Image: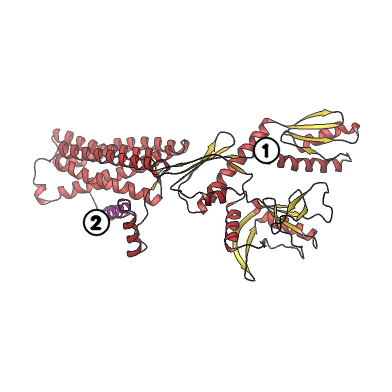
Amino acid sequence: MLQFSRTKIYMIILTCVLAVLFALPNMMSASQRAWVNESLPSWFPSKTVNLGLDLRGGVHRVMEADIDSVVIERADDLAALIRSDLRKEKVETLRPVTSVEGIRIALRQSGDVEKARKIMFKAAPNLVLNADGNTLIGTFDDAFLKDITDKTIAQSIEIVRRRIDETGTREPIIQKQGERRILIQIPGLEDTSELDEILGKTAKLSFHLVNGGTRHAAGSKLLPMAENPAEEISVQRRAMLTGDMLTNAQAAFQDGQPIVTFRLNGLGARKFCKVTSDNSGNPFAIVLDDIVLSAPRINEPICGGSAQITGNFSVEEASQLALLLRAGALPTELYVVEERSVGPSLGADSVEAGKKASIVGLILILVFMAVAYGTFGVFADIALIVNMALIFAVLSGLQATLTLPGIAGIVLTIGMAVDANVLIFERIREELRSGKAIMAAVDSGYSRAMTTIVDSNVTTLIAAVLLFAFGTGPVKGFAVTLAVGIMTSFFSAIMVTRLFVVLWLKNKKNAKRKELPI
């Protein structure tokens, strides 16, 4: 335990130096960091720990998803599928009526009720079927509605997160609240106009065949043109292709005009190829959020898996549209039901209180270790300072968000950081009292305390992992700082302090001592 190769010594020193360098930006003011970025090479560490909403201020917003529109859209798809199956079996029907409750299909012949019931159940087993004369009424069961709600919210959360990340905002808190709501907290955000622009759009891209002349045909809908909202065209209600089949979207230029190019996945490319092959010569509407961007004529099959959206875009509009499509289409609209701005004054007070608690705790521990264990206690104090630098270096590198519970985790880590050294030093004292020589006592102290140290750190680390896995928001922040503190304190106690002890023992003057200053 007392052997250090030259390579290991250099690695420990290098780790400590890097820890100080990566933690240093957190001690600088904004102007000092700006000077560092301008004056020093780009590789020089400049990242800092992000402050959470409770420390930095920002925006707190709760949005509710329009689940009803998703249910109706699913009902329309099921109704089209059921009607197609009924036609194949020669069962004549009137146009299905859909709602958030389910589907109503009126049959022309009352004798077809049982036959239609079986076909309808096979096509949509999640419908509870009842008959009212020659009308079949299918009501969605609770499990089906819950599944739609859960999937819509989960997809919305993921897409909102991706969109916000695209803007460069760091460490937002985005999570489910209740059954239909999403909580969004963005630290440090002052201007919400960009957020409104991004989250206010569903960016639901779809491709529809244009009806040839019949404006009110069954299964169609009227949509306004983007260039002239007063002009409407009739398109088939059912989309032939949807935006979730996109794999990428980028702003580009064609003949000096901004356009948006996109690529489709394998399924989308095959479907797009078939649709354009079967409808060559017919117009094809490109629809974004129920507005027709353009309705070009299909001159030839498009089978390459890539296409473009043209329109009177500005450069900014083309870039914004590409961003929305690239981040993904929200499955439904999100409405703001609560919003408030959190001022930074409370955060400044919290940061100041956290600083005071950390400094007081650190000073008390430094004094205690030096008094209780003498020179070896000073070694432990130096390792503790290195440990603090390591914690902030790792948090800065991870771009972790520091919240008030996170500060509590750091303060707790300060107290826990010296546990390993206390165990080792007390074990060394026991070995010395038993009559062992100094070198043997120190070696035995480290060897025998190691099992206890590893066990205690592993159990605490397991608790931190569980908190991170099952916790939300600030609880995760506490778990991160606790886990990072455990690992860095283990390194500082086992490597840094031990290196000081070994170098001190190998000094010729100290080697002649008959007692240890511990």
Q: Quadrant of the C terminus?
A: top left
Say if the magenta span includes residue 437: no
Q: Quadrant of the N terminus?
A: top left
- Which element type, helix, strand or loop, lies under badge 1? helix
Q: Amino acid at mark 2?
A: Arg
Predominant SS along the magenta part: helix
Q: Is residue 312 above or below residue 162?
A: below
Q: Amino acid at mark 1?
A: Asp
Alpha-carbon neighbours of circle 2 within 10 Å: few (<14), some, or many (≥20)?
Answer: few
Which label was assigned to residue 68?
Answer: 1
Q: CA distance from mark 2 to mark 1?
A: 68 Å
Say if the magenta span includes residue 14: yes
Q: At 14% from the left edge and 36% from the top edge, which residue is drawn?
A: 432
- Which element type, helix, strand or loop, lies under badge 2? helix
Image check: 66 left or right of 17?
right
**Residue farthest toward the bottom in the current orientation of the protein:** 255
Residue 45 % position (x, y): 35, 57
The residue where tag 2 is placed is 6
Labels in figure, total: 2
Instruction: State which region is magenta.
Output: 1-28
**N-terminal-most mark, 2 or 1:** 2
Residue 157 % position (x, y): 56, 43
